[in-house]
Image (cartoon, rainbow, N blue to C red):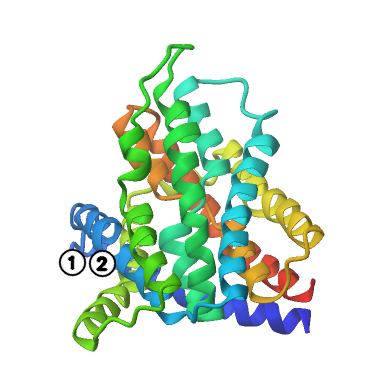
Amino acid sequence: MFLHNVATAAQQVAILYIIVAVGFICDKTKLYTEKAARLTNDLLFQIVTPAVIIQSFTAMEFNRENLKNLLLSFFGGTVIHLAAIVISKPFFRHGEEDTLVIYKFGCVYGNVGYMVLPLAGAVLGDEGVFFCSGVLIPFNIFAFTHGLSLMKKKGGEKHSFDLKSLFINPGVISVAIGLPLFILKITLPDFIMQPIAHIANLNTPLAMLMFGTYLSKTDLKKMFVRKQAYLVAAIKLIAVPLVCMLIYRAVGMTGSLLTALTISASAPTANNTVMFSTKYMRDNEAASQTIAIVSFISIITMPIMIALSQLM
């Protein structure tokens, strides 16, 4: 059964990485370049991912069990980030500050939008996307507090905190739209839901194609000799999901909820590591290469973690 679950999850991950390979080739042949992918990133962030989240809320029936599971997924997302912060804290103390913050950030923040939502949908359907949507709120809370602090603070200096960015962002806004629809059992007419569904269907191919273009710009030789990136991978892909699974089981989580949260916990380093590092003038090359190597390793680790969650 374990090997069957690994094979099933591995097939879904492999499907996603075949699309990544297409994006890689497209960039190399100048058919779809990184410049175009950056515009795609804005489209995904502002339009497509919110459509996925809203669709997942409207697809779920409101009942006490689903509401409880949604609250538990919010709790689960909080556990993921707190566990990652605590586990990674003893590491990455020596070296260039601009590079060290990339590793610290990369241990904590996973690809919950572009990788988790498509994979959860493939493995668990709308239910998985619904549960993983609950992780987006703590992700944004931590990213715009702890994550921003890591990236902006240099040499112990203080930074101003942008409270607006914590609440006014597409992930939180889309949950704010979808949650009342779910709780109030509002059924939107087809002429609204069908465009939302069509836009939501763009999430997986666009996200994976975009990621492929980023990989094509990475110096593969330098990437694979970046030793600390392997430590990031060990923390992000193995230590954090294993600790989280133990906590989830200790509080009684099982079934699809446990698997969905495990997918969220075992996701590779977030693409926004590059965006944050670029904006705050950190080591952008380290960010791209860390994302790339952690993502490559996740092809092996994510199916194993998903299969373990289905056995617990």
Asked if disc 1 and disc 2 are in contact, CB closer than 8 Å, the reply is yes
Q: Quadrant of residue 90?
A: top right
Q: Earlier in the sequence, mark 1 or mark 2?
A: 2
* Residue 92 seen anywhere in this rendered image of the structure: yes
Q: Is the residue 275 above or below the residue 126 in the image?
A: above
Amino acid under disc 2: Cys
Q: Which residue is mark 1?
A: 31
Q: Quadrant of residue 113?
A: bottom left
Asked which secondary structure carries label 1, the reply is: loop
* Residue 222 seen anywhere in this rendered image of the structure: no
> Looking at the image, which residue is at 53% across and 54% down?
268
- Quadrant where the N terminus lies? bottom right
Q: Nearer the viewer, residue 83 or 177?
A: 177
Q: Nearer the viewer, residue 311 or 138?
A: 138
Q: Position of residue 16 (x, y in %)?
A: 45, 72
- Quadrant where the C terminus lies? bottom right
Q: Position of residue 52 (x, y in %)?
A: 36, 70
Q: Is the residue 206 above or below the residue 201 in the image?
A: above
Q: Position of residue 19 (x, y in %)?
A: 38, 73
Amino acid under disc 1: Leu
Q: Which residue is mark 2?
A: 26
In the shown orientation, is residue 142 left or right of residue 308? Answer: left
In the shown orientation, is residue 287 left or right of residue 10? Answer: left
